[in-house]
Amino acid sequence: MRFLFLAGVAAAALHPDLAAAQDQSPAPDLASEDEIIVTASPFGHELDDTPAITSSVDSDDILKSGGSSIAAALSKVPGVAGTGFASGASRPVIRGMDSNRVRLLENGTGVSDVSDVGPDHGVPIDPLSARRIEVVRGAATLRYGSQAIGGVVNAINDRVPTSLPASPFSGEVTGSYGTVDDAWQGSALADAAVGNLALHADAFVRDAGDYSTPLGTEANTFFTGHGASLGGSYFFGGSDSHVGAAIERYDAKYGIPAETSHIDMTQTKLLTRSSFALGTGLLKTLNVDGSYADYQHSEIDSAGMIAATFTNKEYDTRAELLLNPIGMLANAALGAEYQHRDFAALGDASSYLLPTTSENVAGYLFVDLQPLEQLHLELSSRVENVALTGTPASGAFTSRSFTPLSGALGALYELGDAVKVGLLFSSTGRAPAITELFARGPHDGPGTFEIGDPDLTIERANSLEASLRVRSGAFHLEGSVYSSWFSHYIYGDLTGRTCSEDGNCTSDPGGDFREMFYRQQDAHFRGIEGKASYVLADAPAGRLEANVLGDYTRATLGDGSNVPRIPPWRIGGGLDWGSDRVDAGFTLIKVARQDEPGAYDTPTPGYYDLSAQVAWRPFAGRRGIEFVVAGQNLANEVARNAASLNKDLVVQPGRNVRLVVKFALP
């Protein structure tokens, strides 16, 4: 069996020092509250020290969650869902917002793909390559651009090392098998230190067939992919400074359910990360990060012919200057960002979107203030100039330029040692995206005939959010309530008509493409999200913990109608047991019926999502050897994704049991 082969290769690679690694491994910590987050602040704050709540999942969570997307890895984070369009294409949805309102990053720079152009387009980051994924809302999103109104999702890995490894060599190999789609996957990574040089390499492979559902096999849902990276950093100045770079490659093929076509995707990407310690005085550190990506995917029909090709070449460079404390100004950062994007749709896709160019030049300020010992303030502002060129449905080549201004103010107040309350106000402007301005015809994947509006104006969201954190002995709670008032909200408006490929649109519901116009009007998003835990037992043998989580988003347009494709509310909980050698747990979540769909959209029924996992480490500790059995949708419920354009045609995967083996050194 391929699973045993992967395990055998891993054991052979790591066998010489395996026992020593196991003896030295620390016991697992179920609730690490001093985790340092890097996306939510340029100053290395702990997880609980920002006004808006930041969520994080680590590599263990990612491995057990399964799936081939970043969205699947975040499925248990309150407020986060996925578009779920295909096995290889599911973009995160945060508080009902996706696409051009959720910025996807790898180590702080853009993923540089075309997943914002269509829901059938995948994200070229495999979750197996990430060591941690952070979800950020609040003032810190302004560090990353106006396309982060909903939030930021940052996949963090060690492809460009930012610190010297603690040991001369460390490595990890994983293999797994999933029953729902006959999925085999494996990954490997290695880190080494040679003097002042840190080196990193990783690779993954994934092969999954069409997945099964309670209603039968969902056709054309296969996914195959592989990728690799090689990088290194040189440290100097007492290891306080470094320069580094990495090259990575991603290749994937995946089917489009309810269609007969599939997508063949490739991306080659260069990453750079550098940090320079500037000494004492006002200036502290200069960080410079950058990426260049050459992306392409082809949409291949049932006859094996290329019907359409999408290409994207993109630069993204950020420089951030950190200042030393000045009085009650605890920290300050000045940043600048430059993005340049050349996008083209070729073949049949040229009738949907002709070549476009986007250029974004931005500057931002992020400040920490501590006027009182118990009070922490964050202030951020951003100004950017966005220039876009393209050809809308009129056929006239068009240039547009926008200058969105944004600002945010957040406060975190400590009510004693156990309770922290946060309050955040932000006003964020967003320039229209290329599809919203220049879409001009049929898009085969989602089955829409889209018409952009080159006269769209800047969208603005004025948001108010309150957060609560409680850390009182065995009881932990964190949650948020929020409200966002949009002016000139941009959305895809289904008209109820259908169109032929050449643009003949009628009221006949049997046409090939649903007609959609990009329009603007006011909108209101509001909701609540949170999670809590209580330690039922804490003994030398292990710890038993109860957990609950839930989220709810309601979104309406100014005319009183519903914003389309909003995930329904969900609530659930479970139990987790953790010890040196065994972890186990289950979660049962009720996903509600979405009975408030958008115009010409359809309701989706509710369902229960039951998941469970057991992990066994024969020699104790998280390093060494670990065996995991994890299950998703164990009740085998029929589930349709309310956030997906193809939910009426596609059922989500049924019961899945995954077998995982992991070997790690040291």
Image (cartoon, helix red, strand yellow):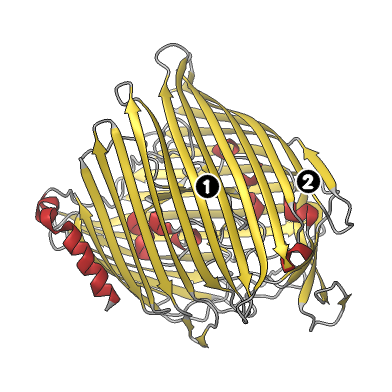
Real-space CA distance between mark 1 and mark 2, rounded to the nearest whole angstrom = 24 Å
What is the crowding at mark 2: few (fewer than 14 residues within 10 Å), some, or many (at least 20)? many
Is 489 situated above or below 47?
below
In this rendering, position of residue 423 left or right of residue 613 = right
- Density class for disc 1 (Cα within 10 Å; few <14, some 14-19, many ≥20) is many
Q: Secondary structure at mark 1?
A: strand
| Residue toward you, 220 or 491 | 220
The three-letter code of the residue at mark 1 reads Leu
| Residue for badge 2 | 389
Residue 410 x, y percent position in the rendering: 56, 34
Residue 625 visible? The answer is yes
Q: Earlier in the sequence, mark 1 or mark 2?
A: 1
Judge whether 552 appears above or below 322 on screen: below
Q: Residue at x 16, y 55 (%)?
A: 539
The mark found on residue 105 in the picture is 1
- Say what secondary structure mark 2 lies in: strand
What percent of the width, then of the height, locates residue 169?
21, 44
